[in-house]
Amino acid sequence: MAGRGSLPEGSLFLGLDSSTQSLKATVLNNELTIVASEIVNFDSELPHYKTEGGVYRDPADDGHIFSPTIMWVEALELLLEKLKPKINFGKVVAVSGSGQQHGSVYWKKGSHAVLSSLDASKSLLSQLKDAFSTMNSPIWMDSSTTKQCREIENAVGGALELAKLTGSRAYERFTGPQIRKIYQTEPDVYEDTERISLVSSFMASILVGSYASIDETDGAGMNLMDINQRTWSKSVLEATAPGLGTKLGKLAPAYSTAGRITPYFVERFQFDKNCLVIQWSVDNPNSLAGLTLNTPGDLAISLGTSDTVFGITAEAKPSLEGHVFPNPVEPDGYMVMLCYKNGSLTREDVRNRCADKSWDVFNNYLEKTPPLNGGKLGFYYKDHEILPPLPVGFHRYTAENLNDVTSDTLLEREVEEFHPPSEVRAIIEGQMLSMRGHAERFGMPNPPKRIIATGGASSNKSILKSIAQIFGCPVFTVQRPDSASLGAALRAAHGWLCNAQGSFVPISCLYKGNLEKTSLGSKLAVPAGNKEEDRELLQKYTVLMRKRMEIERRLVEKIGRS
Ligand code: XUL
């Protein structure tokens, strides 16, 4: 048995990330150094599903976005095949994972029997292809459940009441409204479902060969869990769909063990039969763990398919804006988060339209245009946005008297287009100004002590520079931008340690005093400017941010979802 904080010599910890566009793996050794990583890209490596960005968009139902459940099963098998030559699975003592949040899977009546008797001579795909009452999993990008959101909010006394109860007001992508839509529009599917999993608990279920619990952190993204008690809320369950409690099973803390790996993976991939499967959780909170975020005042910005802003907090104080989730590695703690749907795919769209489909040209435009962009404010929604709740559309304005402004009396003018370099700067500044405006409104620190940037676009220096200027604080980055699979591997190690100790152990025991020697340490990418001109620039960004928030409010009043 290992001593407190130590992991067995030669052991490996496998972290997976079942995200929108891919399934990724990161493997850590007992010194928390990355020894292998792998990826399966859904569109290019599983082309027979014909997904775009890992999803299907329903032309007949605006905002209805889903993924083929069975694709995630096939991806798991392919990922393990690709990883097999790189590591000895027999040395993996624990595995955990991150799932894209909110996505749900509907197990057909009788499927537990299939799941618990998987035959290692056959593929997972062939055995699980008929295990679902619907082949389609609604995912976080879906925005087709506004009606169900309002119904659930009204049933419990309004949006704020629901936020106080569950950590968030009702959001279209949250699993409760999604389940209610299925119950209302496909009652046979609902009736034929014996268990509803989230993407996270679904993948864990395959690994343990039985239905794994939904963890409390991911559970908070459903609008169904009482955020203070961390149990299903009876009143919201009733407002969502009949008999829902039995289809959801029990909740479990993220650091607990879901079970031992099922013999299927022992026989087929030579995992050790004692390998533990630690509860899977959700990507953003697992990133929080992987970024070792433990100081209130630190903010993380994840720039991926979705853009998110998050930080930690000791108390749950939900409001109409943003979300409160349990911290996956701190049993009494919470995290606060904002989520944007128009992240990397929308940045890519601007790159394709204005920068010759090249990130080099894009970055060059960003570098050669001045901060503040001459007061240009752009709102780019290639998909229906979550924050603010606005439909697809682009809106461009120019704030007129930015240079002689001493008060908040900017006048703005709507314009048709910006020239390409300004369009590039407008999308980046617009995204960051929105993050700052909403983070401040949600009570996140202003200015933050520091920002840790992660996700694919965090390797872009020009974007990081804009973040530092707009937020007025230093920006740090981590070795690997895919912090969700790294965080999952760290959580596998943490869960293993909690299991070995027989009780919860603080995660910092794993790396205290040694962080810089592991693959988890962060490094300064852009310092905060401390010259007079930097302070002036920050002040002007503050004025521009307020103008943006005001325009946004008017847009929501005029065309927003309600
Ligand atoms: C979070 C959210 C997204 C997904 C992306 O609430 O909807 O960030 O977790 O995978």
Image: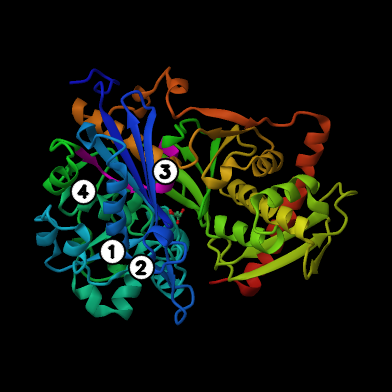
Question: Crowding at label 3, few (<14), some or many (≥20) Cα neighbours within 10 Å?
Answer: many
Identify the element where label 1 is drawn.
helix
What is the C-alpha distance between the residues marked 2 and 1?
A: 12 Å
Identify the element where label 3 is drawn.
helix
Which label was assigned to residue 207? 4
Say whether disc 2 or disc 3 marks the residue closer to the N-terminus: 2
Which label was assigned to residue 48? 2
What is the C-alpha distance between the residues marked 4 and 2?
A: 24 Å
Say whether disc 3 or disc 1 marks the residue closer to the N-terminus: 1
Residue type of the residue flagged with mark 1:
Ile
Residue 342 percent coordinates (x, y): 56, 60
Identify the element where label 2 is drawn.
helix
Asked if residue 279 is among those painted magenta in the image, a careful observer would answer: yes
Residue 475 percent coordinates (x, y): 62, 35
Which label was assigned to residue 70? 1
Q: Which residues are magenta?
A: 276-289
Q: Measuring 29% from the left and 35% from the top, which residue is drawn there?
A: 87
Which label was assigned to residue 484? 3
From the viewer's perspective, is residue 136 above or below residue 336? below
Asked if residue 506 is among those painted magenta in the image, a careful observer would answer: no
State whether residue 268 appears in this view. Answer: yes
